[in-house]
Image (cartoon, rainbow, N blue to C red):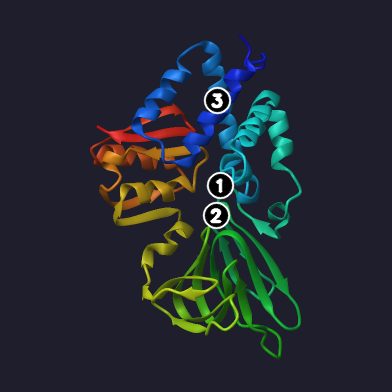
Amino acid sequence: MSSTTAIDGHILDEAAVWLMRLHAGDITEAQRRDWQQWCQRSPEHERAWQRAAQLGQTLSVIPPAIGKQVLQPRTSRRKAVKALSLLLAAGPAAWLGYRLLPLDEWRADYSSSVGQQRRIVLDDGTRLTLNTASAVDVIFDRQRRQINLRRGEILIDTAKDPQATPRPFLVQSAQGTMQALGTRFLVRQWPQASSIAVFEGAVRIQPATAGIPARTLQAGWQMRFDSAGMDAPQAADDSASAWSSGMLVADRLPLRALLAELGRYRHGQLGCDEQIAQLPVSGAFPIDNTDAALALLAHSLPVRLQYLTRYWVSVLPR
């Protein structure tokens, strides 16, 4: 039967519910078995899930402003299920239009897709590297050189301002402003905070809330901050920028945390069983071939990989 054949609406509703549950990431092993049994109930259930997996892949590259509205509903679960069901019924042609909605995230000056690292040389000679699924705006005028980080993670090697009167070099995140003081540094936008690691020079950090004093972070230190304050500085992880060389480096990192990082570089769902979530992992893993990285984990740890499709992978105890 063709995959374009209409699928019963009730089955699409159920597929939408399972898609939201799996995307949330807190599904139990018993629920996972129920989901697998649901997929195997009939050929129509299997086709519905294949379409849901495709939709999950498409939504995984959409910025949070779009994806969270559907996959992490804040208001009405019923409305979210209905929205997903309509998308599942419409098929991939409609998903493309949904992806291209004219939201601010799609109008960034520079952006990278999932799994991509993009290198840019700015007008002043500054080297900017975007990590996976990142987006920035660049504002250079007479008073300032500024990068607005919309989402994701960037590595910056600042250059000397060619103008006679040097302009400050600023990075703006959702939580505050960072002023580079001749430096090489890394900035990452998290859901509720920003983090910065300084490798050369220094960076002055000013949280967004008025009255919060600024702090200068020197080379060799890293810190997380939100709009209301800053955490205590910690020694910078030298491997934090290894992604710019195509690698993810772990030093006794819990398996769940490692998979969360690998998941940034691939489409779809990458799950971890609770029994093995805290296994310590050390090593270097390629981010341009996450399937190879997962195979390396299965070879070196007491774990196995379960692929429903290439976009829905679970790491389970062996």
Name the residue tied to disc 3. 15
Q: CA distance from mark 3 to mark 1?
A: 24 Å
Is disc 2 placed on a helix, strand or loop? loop
Of the two numbered discs 3 and 1 on the same chain, state the one appearing first in sequence: 3
Kind of residue at badge 2? Gln
For the residues labelled 2 and 3, the Cα–Cα distance comes to 33 Å
Q: Residue at x 52, y 61 (%)?
A: 192
Sort mark 2 into few (<14), some (14-19) or many (20+) by Cα contacts within 10 Å: many
Whichever of callouts 2 and 3 sits on the residue coming sooner in the sequence is 3
Mark 3 residue element: helix
Q: Is residue 249 left or right of residue 15?
A: left
Q: Position of residue 312 (x, y in %)?
A: 46, 32
Amino acid type shown at disc 1: Val
Residue 117 tag number: 2
At label 3, which amino acid type do we have?
A: Ala
How far across and down, in percent of the image, does residue 249 sit? 36, 56
